[in-house]
Amino acid sequence: MLKEFFEAIKAYVEAIKHISRHRMWGYVLVPAGLSILLGLGIFGLAWNLSDNVGGILERLWVWEWGRSVVSSIAQLLGGILVFLLGLLVFKQLVMVISSPIMSILSEKVEDQLMGKQSGAGFTIQQIAKDAVRGLRIALRNIFRELGGTVLLLLLGLIPVLSPFTTVLIFLLQAYYAGFGNLDFALERHYRFHESVKFVQKNRMLALGNGAVFMLMLYTIIGFPFALPLGTVAATIAATKRIGGES
């Protein structure tokens, strides 16, 4: 299982080489621009809402004793909660919006890896199909990820558990990010439920891909390029896995 995890990480290096070799940077720059615009909007809104969320959490404490300490903790938790929710929404929304481009990019990469002439291109029917599937994947994942994140945040209120819940939240978000990236390749080979089974069977592949993806999201320089690089890396890793299963 660890082999799959490191295989997914190694695929990012292969992805950069592949994009450079085939001069595919145009497919990187377009979603990068979308990521910047969407990120500024979502995290700007999240910044403005953090104090409000902190105030709501503070009002849940009905006693006078310890109010100043609770107020400080509430403001901190409010900021963390809004940041995590903003990151979750950003991650899934940018995947849905960019899904037609990412699907074409993934198909081109797979064709290049398999030595086939790429038939990837824009059609209204394909754009609609990719958008619907991307939305379906996003809705499934966002509710599961949101539920798990809230549960872990509540467990994190217990001081002895907070270091562990922080790591688990990162792994949870990484898994679903990797799931989304892998599906850009899986959509050409499997139906929706078959793709879910593939990711569950190769969960460490999703986790490794998503871990690098999430680390890139946390950096100012890396976050615009996280989705296209994650998509290419996932396609490279998935193509090897699909080829081995066929």
Image: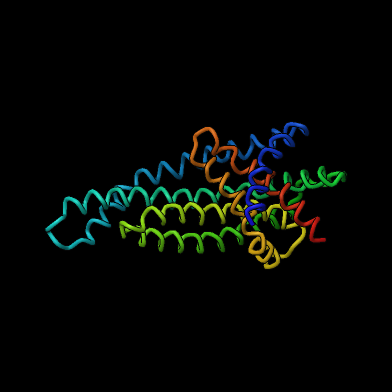
In the figure, residue 154 lies in which quadrant?
bottom left
Q: Is residue 238 left or right of residue 204?
A: right
- The image shows residue 86, relative to residue 13, as above or below, that is below
Q: Is residue 245 left or right of residue 53?
A: right
- Asked whether 153 or 159 is in front, the reply is 159
Which image quarter holds the N terminus? bottom right
In the figure, residue 11 lies in which quadrant?
top right
- The image shows residue 135, relative to residue 120, as above or below, that is below
Q: Where is residue 174 drawn, in percent x and y?
A: 54, 52
What kind of colouring is applied to the model shown?
Answer: rainbow
Q: Where is residue 122 drawn, in percent x and y?
A: 75, 46
- Asked whether 221 or 240 is in front, the reply is 240
Q: Residue at x 16, y 54 (%)?
A: 67
- Asked whether 43 or 128 is in front, the reply is 43
Q: Is residue 89 left or right of residue 51?
A: right
Q: Residue at x 55, y 40 (%)?
A: 35
Which image quarter holds the C terminus? bottom right
